[in-house]
Structures are given as structure tokens and as C-alpha cells.
Amino acid sequence: MLRVIVVGMGPIGINSARAVLANRDMVLTGLVDLDPNKVGKTIDQIEGKGAAAGPKVVGSLAEAAKAGADVAILTTTSFFQRIAPTLRECMKLKLHVVSSCEEMSWPAFRSADLAKQIDAEAKAANVALLGTGVNPGFVMDFLPVVLSSMVNQVTSVKATRRVDASTRRQPLQAKVGATMTKEHFEGLAREGKIGHMGIGESVAMVAHGLGRTAKPEDVKITLQPVMAEREMPSLLGAIKPGQVCGMHNIAKWSGEGLSIDLDLIMAVGWKEPHDTIELGGPVPLKLTIPGSTPGDSATVASLVNLSRVMPRTTPGLKTMLDIPVGGAQGRAK
Amino acid sequence: MLRVIVVGMGPIGINSARAVLANRDMVLTGLVDLDPNKVGKTIDQIEGKGAAAGPKVVGSLAEAAKAGADVAILTTTSFFQRIAPTLRECMKLKLHVVSSCEEMSWPAFRSADLAKQIDAEAKAANVALLGTGVNPGFVMDFLPVVLSSMVNQVTSVKATRRVDASTRRQPLQAKVGATMTKEHFEGLAREGKIGHMGIGESVAMVAHGLGRTAKPEDVKITLQPVMAEREMPSLLGAIKPGQVCGMHNIAKWSGEGLSIDLDLIMAVGWKEPHDTIELGGPVPLKLTIPGSTPGDSATVASLVNLSRVMPRTTPGLKTMLDIPVGGAQGRAK
């Protein structure tokens, strides 16, 4: 039985804890959050569903780890610099880590020195640390590299993800700008306060997987609002024509005989959602996931499925390109 | 520079050697074949193209390895029992191995004891051995497990591969039965002398990747001819209506809350070729490769791309589920 602690009681953390509870090969031994309104509660109590089974939230990793644990699932922050102290706590407690921290999907992209330090510390502590998720972590980075293993040479990678945000939770709809004015969105975009996290990291992973190195200064990232052409319902209220219904995030890099073009739209009411990967080269190859990989449940699944891989990989700060695949070994209790 | 030897000068071996020669991060240090008609010749000479660059075929691995080598690509046999002596020669020479041997994609399926022995010997020799390819090795086994990492629980895996054999080399068209009578095909099928190799191994890999164990006696494999409904050209001459134009290979397993259904048609003139994976469960997920992954070039690509992974993985008899992904890092010289 894999003993798992979940840190961070937001929607992804809570659903990860539920998935751990539901799997017969895992046991949920601890929950951690700093919020005093959550400490002392079970996940059902946090969600107002009464006092169901499972551990209660405690305020520190050290306290949660007293019950014994192998892996910590961290869902606390999108930033590698900010998660580093938690990684160090985990290393002290000899816990492997799987995290939804977007920057941690390719930590060397923005924090090469810190990534090197953490890698050395993880090796010394004999634990493995991984950032993963659906995007970054799978659709626009890991999957293109997987597909590329079937061709000798690739000259271009185009990954297109089209998500209908109306099927997603409310914070995601807010994150993509639903109901904002164009000006409001563009102001937030200029300040870096809106937009998908991790598209630069995805570029770096694809480049590395294909034997190249994409430096941050050479990756061109753009962010534009998607404007509603008709009135649409959303979890933030009706979106009127002329208001923002979503975001369009593009990242491009080229060099060393390869171009990478990642193109993401997440918008309320987007028709024909899908994920598509196109590899150009002497033997072109294309792959499509009709409907697109469902974002929230896939992020949770990746955290839980990769948890099983950590104890059997070598120690260090790992990426999806360093470790064996983590299949859906979950079975209901 | 990765130093590579290729063993077995059939079409896959020759094209692997060409791919190694074309890649700037690899050097082809040796070629091996037992056929006295091939020994002493370059790959261009074998194919009647004159005396181009590259090493000449020698009759033994030991001789080829004298020039120095890190990895041997083996394309000699479909059977794990038959490749075992070659694996042992490679271990003696401290060579990592990547092979297109179909049974070696999941050697424990038919030869659990031998697989255990070879694994122990590889660990002692500190080299890694891998069986891979497009099918088995990717489309109907590895890729479904990769996709499953995005869902918590899977209750069914259906993988459908439809290949238009008219785009493939002549031996493949012969292998699928093109121009045979129905009776001839069925007779060969009863004797196990025709049909795709490795579909049982694919079932075993999917089951393992999803946390189950499929024993050979529980995997139901059927093989039927596909009959031509119209006259079609083939590399074996015209296929007449009522003659065999291809084969239909199905493997099924179910148990432990999971059903696996692998369904392969390779037929001359098959319309709308594709590879499709459908995962059933609480969150269904589907993936399609329109046109289907091109068989011959993808097998070669997988051998070459995975060669780069071998030196950085742990020693032993590995499967695609044990090692990091091998992206297309090839770059033309």
C-alpha cells in the first residue's frame, strides 16, 4: 500500500485526496493546509458534506508525516521558487513528491540554478521529486515527445489544444477571463496576472525531448483574449457579446533545425474541443484527442498515477522525460 | 557519440543502419549477419547500390565489437528463446541491446523463467536490454498505457489498428496473406505460420501497465483472413476478388475489473487506415492517429531513438514500461 499525504486543500488537492481514498492500492495518511479554517476538518467537512472518513487537515507536513507516508502530493503553488521550501521539508521527511506546480514541470526553464541545487539535495535525501499535470505535463509536451519516438527526425512540432471552459470548474473560467472587458483582460495580461501557466516550460520540455535546448529568452509567448460573439452562460454569470469568453496563449521557439508551436485556446463555449499534435519532417505524423483531455480530472489522475512511479525511479528532481510512464493502475475499493 | 552495431541485415536492420549513419549524434561501428552472401559487403553493396561509406558486414558480434560499441540493435528473430544466445553474447561484450524481436517486447508473457534469468544476467553485466517497435512496442500497448495516465480508473481498453498494406514493403504484404486463397491462409493460420507477431505480448503489456496480470492461457487470440472484394494491385501481383488481401488479428482478455480488446487489420487497399485507442471508465478518453503510424519507418525509428535511452537507464531486461521515453533526437548530418 502506497501511503500518501496531500498538501494544499484547493479543488485539485481535495480531488487528489478523494482519488487516493478511492484506490485500493493507496492509503491517505495525511492532509495539510495552512488555512486555519481548514485545519481540523476532513475533506468532506471542508466541502460542507459532513464528517466522513479519512484524516483531518493539519497545519504542517511534519505533523502529517507522523502517521507514516511515502509520497506527498503538493498542490500549493504554480511557482518553483515558492514550492522549494516545501520540497526541502519533504526531503527532510524522506518523502517522494509529485506536484501540480506548473513551473516544476520543467524547473530548469526559469530557475536553472535552484533546480540543480534541489536535484542534488533530492539525490542526497534519496527521494524523487516530479512536477506533472495535464498541461503542462502531458498534452502539449510529454505526448509530442512520446509520439516523436516513432519517427527518426522531426523538423516541426505543432500542438493545438482547444478547451471548452464551460465544462470546467469556476476558478478555471475566471482564470481564462470569462465576462471581462477586452481592456481589463489586456491590462491583467500586461501585468502577468492572467493566463495559462507553464506554456514556456512545455516548449522547453519538447525541445529537450527532441535533443535541443530552448532558452527562456528565445521562447516567444503571446496572450490574447477570445471575444464572445454571442451571449453564453458561465459560472461567473452570462457572458455578453463583446466580452471576453476565454484566452488564446501561443508559445513559439525555433532553432537547431526544429520549430515548436504550441497553441492553446481555453474559452467558454468553444466548439469542437480537441488536442492535436502534428509532427513535421520526412515522415509526418498526427495525433488527435477529440473532445480534448479533460483538464481537472486529468491533473488529479496524473498526480495519483505518477505517485506510484516515484518509489521505483532513481532519486533526484525528475521530469516526465526522466521516468517510466505511470499508467492508470487505480482500482475502486 | 553513441556507437551502434546493427545485427541482422534484413530490411529493418539495413534501414536501422542507414538511420544511424544519418544521425549526427551516432556512429555506426559494426554490421553483423551470418549470411555468407552479405559478409564483407557494405549496406549499399547488399542492396546493389555500389560501395558507399560505412562498415562492412562481419560474421560475428565479437568481431564487430572490436571497433568499440555501446549499443547493439538486433533485428534477427521474432522469438525470445531464439534471441537469448545473442543477448548473452551482447552481455559478454558489455553492449546494451534494443531489438525488434516481437516476443521480447514483453518476454515474460511466453518465457517467464528465461526472462528472469536474462534479467539477472543483464544486471550482473550492467547493461540494459529492450524489445520495442511500432506494434508490438507502441501503438497497441505502450500508447494506451501512456494515455491512461490521464485518468484515474480504466474499465476497458480498445485499441484498433487499420493498416493499408499497399503502402508497405513486399515481405509485409506476403506476411498478411495477399493473393492467397482462403483455405491456404486458414491452413497456415492453424499451423501458426501466418499472422502478426506480438499481439499477446501487447495484451500483457497493457494489463501490466494498468496494474493487472494477463496470463497467456487467458488471452484469446483469433486470426482471420480479409477477403478482397475487388481486384487490387500488390507487390505479389494482382489480388483477385475472393482472394485474401490481408489479415484480421484480435486479442482479448478480461479480468480484475478490466477488459482489453486489441483489434488489428493489415490489408492491401484498406481504406481509411488509422490507429485508435479508446479507454472506457468514469472518464472515457479517445485518441486517434489518422492514416495509422507508418509501420516500417516507425519500427526503425523506435530502435534508433530507444538506443539513446539505454545508456542512461538502470541495467536489466527492460520493457517500454520501465524506461524513460525516447524522443526523436535525430538530426541530419
Image (cartoon, coloured by chain):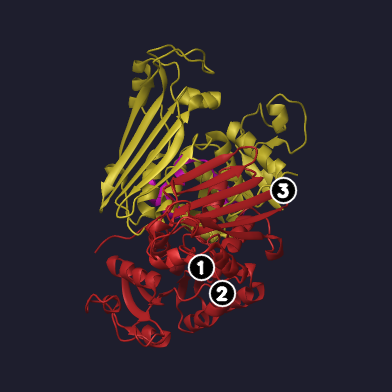
Chain colours: A yellow, B red
Please tell me in which quadrant of the rendered image residue B200 appears: bottom right
Quadrant placement of the C terminus of chain B? bottom left
Q: Position of residue B174 (x, y in %)?
A: 45, 67
Q: Decide which of tag 1 and tag 3 comes sooner along the chain.
A: 1
Is residue A193 positioned above or below B184 on the image? Answer: above
Q: Is residue A108 magenta?
A: yes
Magenta-colored span: A90-117
Please report, as a chain letter, where disc 3 is located.
Answer: B
Left or right, residue B133 beside residue A6: left
Residue bearing mark 1: B131
Q: Is residue B105 magenta?
A: no
Contact between marks 2 and 1 (CB within 8 A): the answer is: yes
For the residues beneath circles 2 and 1, the answer to whether they share a chain is: yes
Q: Position of residue A90 (x, y in %)?
A: 59, 49
Tag on residue B257? 3
Quadrant placement of the N terminus of chain B? bottom left
Q: Position of residue A252 (x, y in %)?
A: 30, 40
Contact between marks 1 and 3 (CB within 8 A): the answer is: no
Residue in the foreground of this view, choosing between A65 and A194: A194
Please tell me in which quadrant of the rendered image residue B68 appears: bottom left
Can residue B105 be seen in the rendering of this structure? no
Contact between marks 3 and 2 (CB within 8 A): the answer is: no
Question: Which residue appears farthest toward the front when viewing the image?
Answer: B241
Q: Residue at x 44, y 47 (%)?
A: B271
Residue type at tag 2? Phe
- Circle 2 — which element? helix
Residue type at tag 3? Gly
- Circle 3 — which element? loop
Residue bearing mark 2: B80
Q: Residue at x 54, y 18 (%)?
A: A235
Residue type at tag 1? Gly
Q: Residues within 10 Å of mark 2 (few under 14, many from 20)?
A: many
